[in-house]
Amino acid sequence: MFGSRKETYCPYCLRKINLSDLRFFCVDEDDNRHEVKLSLMDKFFKRLPTCQRRYCKNRGLTIREVECKHCGEQLPAQILFHDKYLSFCAVGVAGAGKSSYVTTVIHELRYSNVPWVLQAMDTYTTELALLNEKLVYESRNCLIGTTSGIAPRPQFWTILDNSTASQKVPTYSLTVYDGAGEDCEKIGYTPVDAKISRYMSSARMLLIMFDPLILSSVQNEVPPEILYSSIAHERKESAPTNMVSMANALVNYIRQSCNIPPGQRIEARAAVVLTKLDALRDTINGFAPDSTINRESPHLKSKGFVEADSKMVDLEIRDWLIRQGEIAFINTIDANFKNVRVFGVSSFGNPPDMNKRLAKIRPHRVLDPIMWMLANEGVIPIKN
Ligand SMILES: Nc1nc2c(ncn2[C@@H]2O[C@H](COP(=O)(O)OP(=O)(O)OP(=O)(O)O)[C@@H](O)[C@H]2O)c(=O)[nH]1
Ligand SMILES: [Mg+2]
Ligand SMILES: [Zn+2]
Ligand SMILES: [Zn+2]
């Protein structure tokens, strides 16, 4: 499951794949889709095949469509040719802020001063990123809830690592799963649930998104207009308030699908991410103005992952969660995952207004969990 770094997995059925596990198709203008087999040379050079059909307009061109032999799902052709296979899966109750978070992370990775270049591998990823980016950054509207009842379609990105001076630019494939909270809350035994749980169990990092605004202790303190604007109203009816039962459902599912006995901790990294930090700014029981969590993230500037800063943030938020009575949630996560780190983020930087319109987007610490994953995968150095 969590194999060595050079291995590639089908992001849908999670089988380990190489060239011979794929089927290739040439699609010419007349929509005459036909299969193209690998030649011996293709296999030897580990390269994509070219169409050899006699009168095909694409003869001699590299194929564009690839599917997994095992599950039949379409994959981006480049997926095999990366130095590392990274993936994360955002889970959390409905309206926790998962999609907003993913949107700002992708935006930060693409447009702020980071040493990486991000490229979408397929049109679905390109279009979704464009749509969400327009909504949030240009129209300044909140996103609407992710469609539930279907397994989330993975988003495929290539990261080009510009931080090394070597001639060959290392590339990493980054798969992002962002499903509907409604589906994570009541995960059962339908085929869709099985698919979602497979995604969760295969991810190299789980982002367990924790919405502080579901806690009654917080609801009593946050000004009503901020509470109103920071909650997903279309989800209000179904919104559960219990992170512990969600955490339990989550770990049971991962255990089952990966066959991990109860006494053994799950290997996947778990980043617990407290969202919507901006909404807590003026609460008495919130974080002190000079606390580490309120300071600017130091990682990018330090060109690495600053362990001391991250550990401090982890402590501050754990302490805060305990003060809110959420010790059972933290215990559940700690008891089940080998590697847990707690983070706090604000995707927007400010709460939306009463009409759910956003001010200029100023993400706070959104890249921290991603930098933790990159540091642990050896992509960026750990600074002590
Ligand atoms: N104040 C504040 N509110 C936020 C922030 N991020 C998200 N929200 C609010 O939370 C609501 C839900 O955000 P989404 O990103 O759609 O949540 P989700 O977890 O993807 O929800 P589902 O797709 O339904 O599971 C938004 O409409 C915003 O009102 C944030 O950084 N600050
Ligand atoms: Mg969503
Ligand atoms: Zn597959
Ligand atoms: Zn052809």
Image (cartoon, helix red, strand yellow):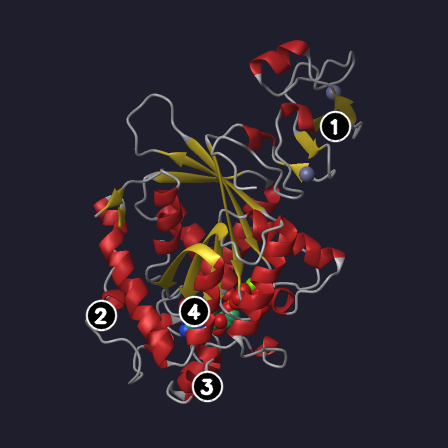
Q: Nearer the viewer, residue 294 or 377?
A: 377
Q: Do the numbered discs 3 and 2 sit on residues whose CB atoms are within 8 Å?
A: no
Whether pointer 1 and pointer 2 mark residues with C-beta atoms closer than 8 Å, the reply is no
Whether residue 83 is situated above or below residue 300 in the rendered picture: above
Q: Which residue is mark 4?
A: 330
Q: Nearer the viewer, residue 90 or 251?
A: 251
For residue 274, above or below residue 280: above
The three-letter code of the residue at mark 4 reads: Ile
Is the residue indicated by label 3 positioned so its CB lies within 8 Å of ligand 1? no
Q: Position of residue 321 (x, y in %)?
A: 38, 75
Residue 177 percent coordinates (x, y): 56, 52
Q: Nearer the viewer, residue 320 or 177?
A: 320
Left or right: residue 354 versus residue 114 is: right
Residue 291's label in the rendered image is: 2
Indicate which disc, 3 or 4, sits on the residue closer to the N terminus. 3
- Secondary structure at numbered mark 3: helix
Q: Gap in Å between the C-alphas at discs 3 and 2? A: 23 Å
Q: Amino acid at mark 1?
A: Glu
Dot 3 corresponds to which residue?
216
Local packing at callout 1 (Cα closer than 10 Å; few below 14, some 14-19, many 20+) is: few
Of callouts 4 and 1, the N-terminal one: 1
- Seen at 52% across and 73% down, the residue is 244
Instruction: Look at mark 1 in the image and give the residue it sits on.
Output: 29
Task: Tell me if residue 328 comes above or below residue 165 in the rendering.
Answer: below
Residue at mark 4 to residue at mark 1: CA–CA distance: 55 Å
**Residue at image coords 29%, 57%:** 310
